[in-house]
Image: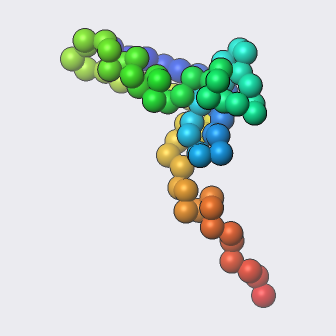
Amino acid sequence: MVVFVAGHGMLDTNLDDYFVTHDFERERPNVRGLSYEQLESLLDGIPARRKLMMMDTCHSGEVDEDAIRTPPPLRR
């Protein structure tokens, strides 16, 4: 089974990834957005032996939290 998701994506303040739905609220992505964990749990409930989920959304790759939270070095 192959699932392909394409559209807009957004990170919340905890750097959790959300698929932007039609009624998405930017200030509260967890209310109307579809989290990666929710998508993953939908797949877990399907009894296929092999599953592949591909996402083509903004921020759908792995986030390097250290790079985001650490300010860049000062230039001299």
Front-most of residues 1 and 23: 23
Quadrant containing the N terminus in the rendered view: top left
Q: Residue furthest bottom?
A: 76
Establish if 10 lies above or below 68: above
Residue 75, position in %: x, y? Answer: 76, 82
**63 sits to left or right of 23:** left
**52 sits to left or right of 68:** left
Number of numbered discs visible in the structure rendering: 0
Residue 17, position in %: x, y? Answer: 57, 36
Establish if 63 lies above or below 32: below
Residue occupying the point 72% across, 15% down: 23
How was the colour assigned to the protein in this rendering? Answer: rainbow
Establish if 6 lies above or below 57: above
Q: Quadrant of residue 49?
A: top left
Establish if 51 lies above or below 28: above
Residue occupying the point 53% across, 55% down: 64
Residue occupying the point 59% across, 46% down: 14
Residue 68, position in %: x, y? Answer: 63, 58
Front-most of residues 29 and 3: 29
